[in-house]
Image: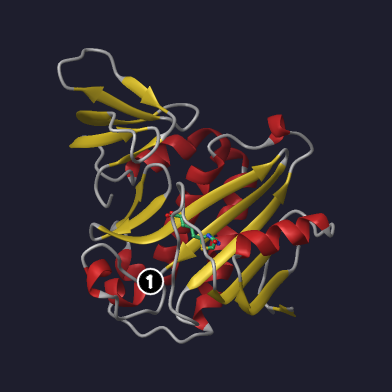
Amino acid sequence: MKKLNIINPFNAPVYHEETVSSTMDVSRRLASEGEPHGTVITADFQEAGRGRGQDRVWQMNRGENLPFTILLRYPRVEDIPSALTLRAGLAVSFAIEDFAPCLRSKVKIKWPNDIIINDKKNAGILCEADGGIVHIGIGLNAAQKEFPAALREKAVSIALAADKDIAPEERFILLEEILARFFDELNAQKNITDWKSRLEQRLYKKGEQVVFVEGEADSGREVKGRLEGIGEGGELLILAEGETQTRAFVTGELKIFV
Ligand code: BTN
């Protein structure tokens, strides 16, 4: 496994492989081998990349995009920072704007953890945990300019959104920016209290009418209403049609791409 020569503020290695099954699997192996908090594994290609939800696969073109997993270690489950995946999304959204300033104010966060640009999905985040060990997997469309017909209306890369070519090595500059933003997000004192308001400023569909599917994607439990914001623990707040009290949801998905 090669080490990338980029700055990781967590002071941990950033590994790169050409081909892996899933960076989540490699991250688990690295955890079992004792690699430190903040270790990153990225790859050119995943043979069995996985998405959120049962049986969801995550496929990306070889060498054009940025799939990676950050390994975080906390002494106990109670020490895991609140709303960790949402805050990872926040960091990714800021880093994208650092990388491509023309996208400023266009990068949104779709609850619970998709990055949206121009109403299309740019990145997805998958969080897996074993006690206090957390693996944050991020799949970000970076340089890809052509998507299969089935995805063309749903997916976008930074190259397409910013109308610029991105060379393969530039993906790692973006990774460096994501790590810098994520480290600040987790460590800067002020961010502990203000992540919610910063997130709400870039929350996709905030104040709009939405259809939300509660629980599993095939649960059939649809809630129609206005998306009000985010609760203290990262839950999604919706004022359902005909109701007067906002409801808070911890699992589910907005019915947009599903
Ligand atoms: C989703 O939107 O469904 C989440 C997608 C997460 C994909 C990333 S790519 C890097 C890491 N490895 C995986 O197998 N999945 C995550």
The local secondary structure at tag 1 comes to loop
- Residue 221 visible in rendering: yes
Q: Is residue 79 left or right of residue 142?
A: right
Residue at (33%, 39%) from the top-left corner? 218
Total count of labels? 1
The spot of residue 227 in percent (x, y) is 26, 32
- Label 1: how many Cα within 10 Å (few below 14, some 14–19, many 20+): some
Residue at (61%, 65%) from the top-left corner? 23
**In the image shown, does 95 or 240 lie closer to the viewer?**
240
The spot of residue 33 in percent (x, y) is 84, 60
Q: Is residue 237 left or right of residue 86?
A: left
Q: Is residue 71 left or right of residue 195?
A: right
Residue type at mark 1: give it: Ala
Using the image, determine if residue 171 lies above or below residue 92: below
Using the image, determine if residue 55 lies above or below residue 236: below
- Residue 39 visible in rendering: no
The spot of residue 60 in percent (x, y) is 44, 72
Q: Report which residue position mark 1 lands on.
A: 100
**In the image shown, does 120 or 151 lie closer to the viewer?**
151
**In the image shown, does 101 or 6 lie closer to the viewer?**
6
Q: Quadrant of residue 154?
A: bottom left
Residue at (73%, 40%) from the top-left corner? 132
